[in-house]
DNA sequence: CGCCGGATTTAA
DNA sequence: TAAATCCGGCGA
């Protein structure tokens, strides 16, 4: 876990790490890097606001935001203080607490798609705005811990950013565990 | 203050 | 392929 490295390196280093809450343990299988004001795909593109303030804070804090009027998205703030950057957790596989995850996801049985998607990850962990700014390096509530890294990493363009500049859309800042099935749209990813 | 549109998911 | 559904950011 190298949260103070460049945001794309930080995103790669989060693959395989564990998210722990309430007996639920998820292993991160997919992540996307978002930079500062220079990244036209990032929430930081309009500068510092009340919503994205956590991106300016120290590395290791949770940045939660509400999207499409429906979903909560979990990000990990990276980089030094005053340097806005965050990694969106896009996918995970369940390591422990399967019953709790199935209940929260309102799904009868497990599948590779159970937590493949950023909205699904936050829902599986039971997250909402109250976790915004939470210190993931501390114990309790919601914690981020080292986990088994992937054997190989695949990468591709970030998803859902058609509003960004062509250069930023093309930037291969989406990363995933090449051996995990808990990854949405795997065809858009290729070996590093 | 009102409008536009989004780092998505789900079901048809 | 579209509907669900809310709020941030921006322009008036």
Image (tube, coloured by chain):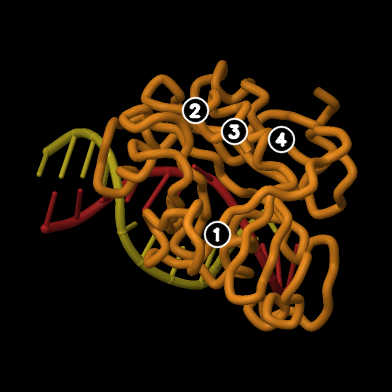
Chain colours: A orange, B red, C yellow
For mark 1, give the secondary structure.
strand
- The quadrant in which the N terminus of chain A is found is top right
State if disc 2 and disc 3 touch (CB < 8 Å): no
Specify whether disc 2 shares its chain with disc 4.
yes
Query: Which residue lies under the disc numbered 2?
Result: A164
The Cα atoms of the two marked residues, 3 and 2, are separated by: 27 Å
Most foreground residue, A98 or C11 = A98
Residue indicated by mark 4: A175
How far apart in space, not on screen, are marks 1 and 2 (Cα)?
32 Å
At x 40% / y 29%, what residue is drawn?
A: A80
Q: Does mark 3 fall on the same chain as mark 1?
A: yes
**Residue A143, disc:** 1
Q: Earlier in the sequence, mark 2 or mark 4?
A: 2
User: Which label was assigned to residue A2?
Assistant: 3
Q: Which of marks 1 and 4 is in front?
A: 1
- Which numbered disc flags the more N-terminal residue, 1 or 4? 1
**What chain does mark 4 sit on?**
A
The C terminus of chain A appears in which quarter of the rendering?
Answer: top right
């Amino acid at each position: 876990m190298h949260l103070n490295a460049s945001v794309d390196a930080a995103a790669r280093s989060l693959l395989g790490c564990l998210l722990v809450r309430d007996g639920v343990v998820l292993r991160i299988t997919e992540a996307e890097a978002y930079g500062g004001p220079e990244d036209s795909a990032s929430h930081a593109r309009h500068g510092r606001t009340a919503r994205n303030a956590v991106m300016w804070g120290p590395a290791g804090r949770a940045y939660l935001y509400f999207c499409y009027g429906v979903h909560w998205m979990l990000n990990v703030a990276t980089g030094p203080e005053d340097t806005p950057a965050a990694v969106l957790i896009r996918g995970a596989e369940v390591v422990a607490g399967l019953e709790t995850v199935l209940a929260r996801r309102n799904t009868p049985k497990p599948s590779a798609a159970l937590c493949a998607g950023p909205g699904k990850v936050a829902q599986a962990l039971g997250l909402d705005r109250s976790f915004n700014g939470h210190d993931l390096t501390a114990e309790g509530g919601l914690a981020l811990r080292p986990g088994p890294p992937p054997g190989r990493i695949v990468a591709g363009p970030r998803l859902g950013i058609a509003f960004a500049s062509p250069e930023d859309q093309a930037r291969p800042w989406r990363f995933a565990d090449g051996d995990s099935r808990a990854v949405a749209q795997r065809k858009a990813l290729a070996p590093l």
